Amino acid sequence: MFVAPQVVSTYVALSQFSQNMGDRDKWLQCEQMAIQKSSLCWFSREGLLATAQLMQALAYTKLCLGHLDFSIKLGFQAHEICRHLKKPALENLVLSVLFRSAFLKKKFDLCVHVLESQWALISQGRDVLGLACFYSACLDLLLYGKGLLCRPFGECLHFIQHCEHSCILNSQSNVMLGVHSSLAMWFAQDSQWNLFEHHFSKARQLVKRTNASLFGSHGFVRFLECHVLVLQKMPEGVFMHTPPETRSQTLKDLTEWLMSRRIRMKKKLKTVYVKENHLKGPWFSCCI
């Protein structure tokens, strides 16, 4: 019996939400149901798209669990389907997850390959958010990639300075937290403490508006790196505008970030609960 692609997409969405809520049993149950239903999906363009979305979601899940090799394998499979279907938005998302898995695995040559594919995908368009995510990844490679680079630092900085006040990026606190924290770390390497303070201050203004998404979590980790650096350098008197940092302040920022994540997820739970109950009508029941 064939099932509609929307069934697979629904299970994928519920699995991702359950993962974010920390409901491991339901997360894995919905993930398994999505995999089972995908094998019964109509062999069509819509069916292939649902399969690509499932593989992308699984790649993200395995990334979060630390199963990086499996995440990379799934990412490549999803990427091939996206290229076949000519779905640039989904392909860009797949490449973002693939880069993060390769980066954490320290496969920096693969990171360069992924970024080159991403650049070919977005460089000709006007996707400001896609470019911001791309340059954020380039900054990671510049900071920790042992000399490898995809785009030079000057180009990354020019893009951020030119576009950071756009309406699109103003609404993307998760991405911009990572960008400004990475820029701060870059300037710290050259002991340009005024520029470090400038970008660290911007990151601090963004941190309360972020969540625990892929980019939000990455940005907050970079922000904590800046915090640690401030704690280390504060006794040397290198900062002109940054107030004295304490370990308790760092802990406070971390606690506030985790609490804001819980509040946002509770609000989201109410919305999804209504939608899920709505889906448990005749159509949803016959698909289980």
Image (cartoon, grey):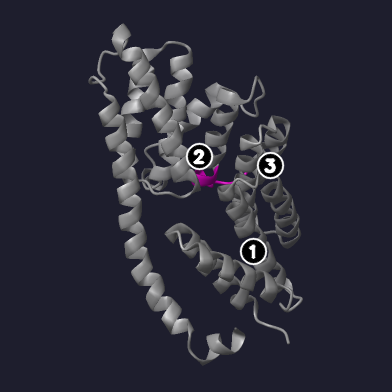
Specify whether 153 is left or right of 220.
Answer: right
Which circle, 3 or 2, is nearer the viewer? 2
Q: How many marks?
A: 3
Kindly state the secondary structure of the residue where label 2 is placed.
helix
Nearest the viewer among 178 and 268 is: 268
C-beta proximity under 8 Å, tags 3 and 2:
no
In which quadrant will I find the C terminus?
A: bottom right
Q: Is residue 138 above or below residue 211?
A: above
| x, y percent for residue 159 | 49, 32
Could you tell me which secondary element the residue under label 1 belongs to? helix
Identify residue type, mark 3: Ala
Query: Which residue is under mark 1?
Result: 54
Q: Are marks 1 and 2 in contact (CB under 8 Å)?
A: no
* Residue at the image position 66 percent from the left and 36 percent from the top: 105
Residues at marks 1 and 3, CA–CA distance in whole angstroms: 24 Å
Q: Where is mark 3, residue-wise?
A: 120
Q: Which residue is at 42% across, 82% downward?
A: 277
C-alpha distance separating marks 1 and 2: 25 Å
For the residues labelled 3 and 2, the Cα–Cα distance comes to 15 Å
Label 1: how many Cα within 10 Å (few below 14, some 14–19, many 20+): many
Image position, residue 6 (x, y; %):
60, 76
Residue occupying image coordinates x 63% and y 63%: 53
Q: Residues within 10 Å of mark 2 (few under 14, many from 20)?
A: many
The part of the image, by quadrant, that contains residue 41 is bottom right
Q: Which residues are magenta?
A: 124-130
Q: Is residue 172 left or right of residue 133?
A: left
